[in-house]
Image (cartoon, rainbow, N blue to C red):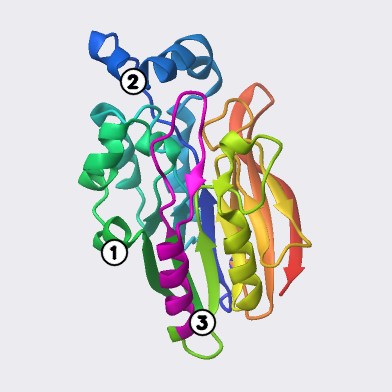
């Protein structure tokens, strides 16, 4: 996987879900008891973070220039979970752009205090719920924070009218020929579970159709990876990098009119677990 000097090589990861089970009675004053029950019964077995430690060195070897994380660093927005996530992010040698997910605003108190930003400071994203970063080689990153605290058994995000206006204003200011990667924790299109979707996703879809400068939409939330090839823009869900034994993430080589996408899978071969490329495809813009 030697890097082409003409490309911008980036990685897209999501949903690492660092977790700590708490037995403190205060959990019953919020939604946290549900998250802890889920952790105790299911997630601790299926979502593990030990194998994530190999990724920073691997991306170094692959000459990755930028990493994008699209949310859910924690499981129930505990300080201990954020501390583990912060230490992990700081282990990457290349720049990392990141966004919160619904689990990072899991309780009303976590959302109200914007606890995520105590560990991952970002003035623009915290204040305006949107950030814009020039990546180089004609590419830009725009990140959206659509994470809100939700009722029991709900996990939706919210794209507000204020965010819509700010996003359009930023898109209008970009230089001619700019190519944009838009990141959000939540899927662009609705599913069969409305309690899990992005509210006002139709408004975001219509806005992006008007701005073909946005080439990619990266998200997580749904833990199984998929790609919507016929969408405008192209939509990539990287799945959960923490899922074991089949955690996934994407590697992109970005050119002016084309991208090469490779999906890396954590799986067992010859009695050894490792990250391997199990699929790749080129896309034209």
| Label 2 secondary element | loop
Q: Secondary structure at mark 1?
A: helix
The residue drawn where x is 65% and y is 21% is: 271
Residue 251 location (% of width, % of height): 59, 55
Q: Earlier in the sequence, mark 2 or mark 1?
A: 2
Quadrant of the rendering where the N terminus is positioned: bottom right
**Residue bounds of the magenta highlight:** 144-172
* Residue 165, horizontal then vertical, whole percent: 44, 71
Label of residue 138 in the image: 3
Is residue 50 rendered magenta in the image? no
| Residue 20: mark in rendering | 2
Q: Earlier in the sequence, mark 2 or mark 3?
A: 2
Disc 2: CA contacts within 10 A as few (<14), some (14-19) or many (>=20): many
Check contact, mark 2 vs mark 3: CB within 8 A.
no
As drawn, which residue projects farthest toward the right? 230
User: How far is the residue under mark 2 from the one under mark 1?
Assistant: 29 Å
**Horizontal and vertical percent position of residue 62:** 53, 57
Q: Residue at x 48, y 31 (%)?
A: 51
Element assignment for label 3: loop
In the displayed structure, 77 sits above or below 135; it is: above
Measuring 44% from the left and 27% from the top, which residue is drawn there?
Answer: 50
Q: Nearer the viewer, residue 2 or 248?
A: 248
The residue tagged 1 is: 124
């Amino acid at each position: 996987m030697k890097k082409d000097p003409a490309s911008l090589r980036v990685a897209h990861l999501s949903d690492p879900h660092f977790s700590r089970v708490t037995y403190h009675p205060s959990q019953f004053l919020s939604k946290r008891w549900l998250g802890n029950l889920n952790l105790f019964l299911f997630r601790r077995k299926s979502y593990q973070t030990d194998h994530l430690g190999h990724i920073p060195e691997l991306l170094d070897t692959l000459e990755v220039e930028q990493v994008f994380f699209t949310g859910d660093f924690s499981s129930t927005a505990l300080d201990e979970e954020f501390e583990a996530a912060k230490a992990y992010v700081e282990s990457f040698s290349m720049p990392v752009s990141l966004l919160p997910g619904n689990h990072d605003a899991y309780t009303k108190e976590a959302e109200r205090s914007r606890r995520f930003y105590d560990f991952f400071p970002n003035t623009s994203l915290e204040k305006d719920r949107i950030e814009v970063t020039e990546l180089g080689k004609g590419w830009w990153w725009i990140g959206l924070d659509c994470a809100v605290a939700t009722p029991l058994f709900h996990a939706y995000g919210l794209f507000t009218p204020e965010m819509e206006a700010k996003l359009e204003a930023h898109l209008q200011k970009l230089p001619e020929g700019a190519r944009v990667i838009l990141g959000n924790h939540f899927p662009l299109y609705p599913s069969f579970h409305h309690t899990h979707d992005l509210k006002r996703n139709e408004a975001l879809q219509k806005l992006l159709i008007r701005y073909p400068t946005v080439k990619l939409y990266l998200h997580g939330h749904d833990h199984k990876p998929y790609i919507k090839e016929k969408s405008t823009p192209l939509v990539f869900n990287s799945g959960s990098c923490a899922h074991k034994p089949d955690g996934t993430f994407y590697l992109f080589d970005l050119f002016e009119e084309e991208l090469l996408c490779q999906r890396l899978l954590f799986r067992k071969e010859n009695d050894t677990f490792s990250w391997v490329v199990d699929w790749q495809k080129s896309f034209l813009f």
